[in-house]
Image: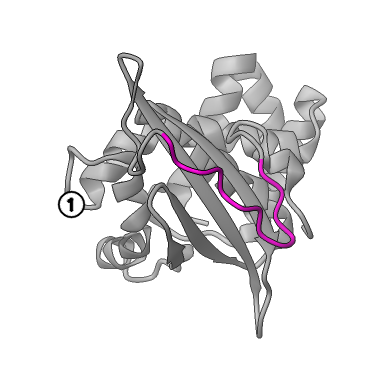
Amino acid sequence: MIGFVNGAFENWVTERHGAEAWRRVAGRVETSVFIGPEDYDDDVTADLARAVAAETGLRVDDVLASVGEHLGRTAGRRLDVMLGRGESRFQDVLRRLPDLQTRLELVCPTARPQRFTIVDEDGDSISIVHASTRADLAPLFAGTVGGLASAFGVDATVSCRRVDSGSGVRHEYRVHWQEKVAGRDTSDRPATKRAAKPRPGVSAGRATTAARRIDGT
């Protein structure tokens, strides 16, 4: 996991529970200072989540989802600029996530950024496969997508299923969005669009709670 993602744990804890709470969290983990574009083992992220859960009394999945939402809200527009635009829509940023790994590798050649693959797209929904080394970090990405939606003023739902194949851990996230401006539906489909048909093994939920309903993690 790249450093700025791990750094979001400190920001989240400090904003919600104060600097002293973060000092206690930092005392429970081996690594608590992170350099933005550098790569850290996913075990470091998992250790952070457990330490924050111990400090706050929250479930680890809830910590991951909430930190992810915080990261998505605060980094959403900066991520858009990093990906080369600056005036994009929520769905445009999702479509360009595979480009993120290339840009991060240019900034930090030793980094091993998260891998994203777009596997399906249908109007106002998109499916993204995310490769990781740990299954238990899935709520972090689901929460981040929800936070990105908030940053772009979009109402989004996220569902997830595990789709491992070969080495590593893979999850497929199905994201559906609906942007509203002054009471007008501005999603990619007409307002009379038919509800999306559920996919096998996928349970839908609002972006802010989807991480609590992830299947197979």
User: What colouring method underlies this structural image?
Assistant: one colour
Classify residue 162 as left or right of residue 149: right
Q: In the drawing, does residue 126 fall left or right of residue 157? A: left
Identified at 70% across, 50% down, the residue is 46
- Relative side of 207 to 52, left or right: left
Which segment is the magenta one?
192-204
Nearer-the-camera pick, 32 or 79: 79
- Residue ID at (32%, 70%): 109
Residue 97 appears in the rendering: yes
Q: Nearer the viewer, residue 191 or 100?
A: 191
Q: Residue at x 76, y 55 (%)?
A: 215
Residue 8 in the image: state x and y as whole percent: 51, 36
Please name the amino acid that badge 1 sits on. Gly
Q: Is residue 6 above or below residue 122?
A: above
Q: Secondary structure at mark 1?
A: loop
Using a 10 Å C-alpha cutoff, classify the residue at mark 1 as few (fewer than 14 neighbours), some (14 to 19) or many (20 or more).
Answer: some
Q: Is residue 91 above or below residue 98?
A: above
Residue 24: in magenta span: no
Q: Position of residue 2 (x, y in %)?
A: 46, 55
Can residue 18 be seen here? Answer: no
Return the x and y of residue 95 as percentages of the image width and height: 34, 56
The residue that disc 1 covers is: 84
Please provide percent x and percent y for residue 120: 46, 65
Q: Identify which residue, 197 or 72, lies in the foreground.
A: 197
Above or below — where is 19 with respect to 128? Answer: above
98 lies left or right of 41: left
At x 41% / y 47%, what residue is drawn? 124
Main SS, magenta residues = loop
Q: Does residue 198 belong to the magenta stretch?
A: yes
- Name the residue nearer the viewer: 153 or 122: 122
Q: Name the image quarter holding residue 217.
A: bottom right
